[in-house]
Image (cartoon, coloured by chain):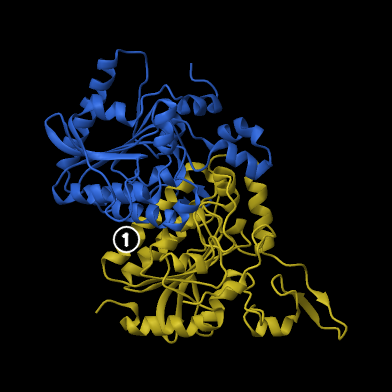
Chain colours: A blue, B yellow
Amino acid sequence: MSGTPYERVKLARDSERPTGQDYIRNVFKNFIELHGDRKYADDKAIIGGIAVLDGIPVTVIAIEKGHSAKERVARNFGAPHPEGYRKALRLMKQAEKFGRPVICFVDTSGAYCGIGAEERGQGQAIAENLMEMSTLCVPVISVLIGEGGSGGALALAVADRVWMLKNSVYSVISPEGCASILWKDSAKADVAAASLRLTSEDAKSLGVIERILSEADMGKKEYYDRIRLLLAQEVSELSRDPELLQKRYDRFRRIGMVADGQII
Amino acid sequence: MPLLNFLKPKNKLEEGGRSSAPVQSDAGEPEQSCPNCHKAIPLSRLWADKLVCSCGYHFRMKARQRIGTVADKDSFCELFSDIRSCNPLGFPGYEEKLDTVKTVSEESEAVICGTALIGKQKCCIFAMESYFMMGSMGSAVGERITALFEYAVEHRLPVVGFTVSGGARMQEGLLSLMQMAKTSAAVKRHSDVGLLYIAVLTDPTTGGVTASFAMEADIILAEPGATVGFAGKRVIEQTTRQTLPKEFQSAEFVLEHGFIDKIAHRKDQRKLLTQFLRMHNGGQKL
């Protein structure tokens, strides 16, 4: 039933898929949104705040693409600016101060490519998140719910556990971008999609994620209840782990280790 | 603050930053024409000036030559050169590409790491190689950089790094992307024990390298005219359908916007690095 990798990319981009807000609304209780990076602006492509997960206060951060055409424009199609990543980091630091676990939902074609984004340090903002998240002293779980577009997705996914929805994708570059750079032909995106190994099954076999969440046909309540249960269980386990930060370091440290010309 | 705007020809990236091959002058000495001022420069003179034209244009420099311009003579000891790329995803054409660039660059990967003395002060040093797939970061680059920062923590040493990169290496897919997180975590550990890291951004420093260890240094320098940015200019133009300002993403542009500490001409780098290391007790924590 799975389809070709490029068909999976199209599925991951489908505007009918649940977005960050849908997960916030259905998985958590009492969500209160907190705005702004305290430096420049409030980026509407990233929603963040405090909510209750199965009785425990958590910080929730989600990249939001929006559903309707109007909302998608307002959300910049889920392409965050630097201030979005800075807002996310501010809320994560706040979570650390008050001992709250952090849950991120990732769904972006990538960090926004624009003049203002470059002027305000898109690269620096992502770099800072990668660095700070590596030592954030509370459990972090990131769930890729749609597109996991390169550094713009990774900036919310330096986590203890990274999960992917079955039909989400995670890639270093879009298949169209890859085909256009390597073969000067964006029509070869299907070949690129297959070569990049970007499906959830690929990410699992490469050791980049821990779990694939089923999208099998089930009722709405059942679907979100299951995710809530899995998150609550994982948060509770991670919260008790005295080796949390060492394990997070090791989690990324072992990816792409090379010995004798082989990835181990 | 006056900006050194005169250094960068408009289409340097599109030209691959490489100027035409050297030609013989009338006097018989090989000459290289400058892509900025179009003057012919005798090669001997260009080398004596560390590949900088009298107009200020900085030519690209190979990683090993670059280490030679800042390190004390014969002080460089290479580390981790046994860490090599392979083709973990079976990406079409990647092995052939690696074979070609290994021959062209005479290097085994897109970064060289080791220890060196700069003004008699010991440090860890890395220099990325533009002639190796434009310094793109795959697993081996990430592994070498991470191993170097871990070595620096173990031996209480500062790190001096020269970046040049087109970003993460597509041919290793997600594994390349994860190197951004891996190197950042290693830089963080180095920083958290109070050790100094100085990055020198050279032309071009972009994509996943900008969004990780290039922007994570305590002190960030950049060469005049170097392209420093996250997204590629063409991608931005296509996305926004706007014409980009002339100096967009130049070292001078990122200085003006507050993202680097200082622009460092190649001839001043050795002295500057020596001073910085000295002012930080050799970069080692007391």
- Tell me if mark 1 has few (under 14), some (14-19) or many (20+) residues whose alpha carbon lies within 10 angstroms of its own: many
On what subunit does the disc labeled 1 rest?
Answer: B
| Closest to the observer, A209 or B46 | B46
Left or right of residue A38, residue B43 in this image: right
- The image position of residue A208, as x and y in percent, is 40, 40
Check disc 1 and report its element: helix, strand or loop. Answer: helix
The amino acid marked with disc number 1 is: Lys
Instruction: Identify the residue position indicated by label 1 in the image.
Output: B188
Can residue B87 be seen here? The reply is no
Furthest-right residue in this view: B26
Q: Position of residue B255 (x, y in %)?
A: 46, 69
Q: Is residue B109 above or below residue A99?
A: below
Q: Would residue A19 appear left or right of B238 to someone viewing this image?
A: left
Q: Can residue A31 be seen in this view?
A: yes
Work out whether A61 lies above or below B248.
Answer: above
The image quadrant that residue A241 belongs to is: top left
For the point 46% across and 78% down, the residue is B116
- Pick the residue in front: B108 or B184: B184
- Relative placement, left or right, of B228 versus A37 is right
Residue B90, image x, y percentages:
58, 39
* Residue B109 higher or lower than B280, as above or below: above
**Residue A186 appears left or right of B161:** right
| Number of callouts | 1
At 61% from the left and 33% from the top, the residue drawn is A189
Quadrant of residue B195 within the rendered picture? bottom left
Residue at position x 19%, y 31% in the image: A232
Residue A65 occupies quadrant: top left
Q: Where is residue B271 in the image (x, y as percent from the top left)?
A: 47, 85
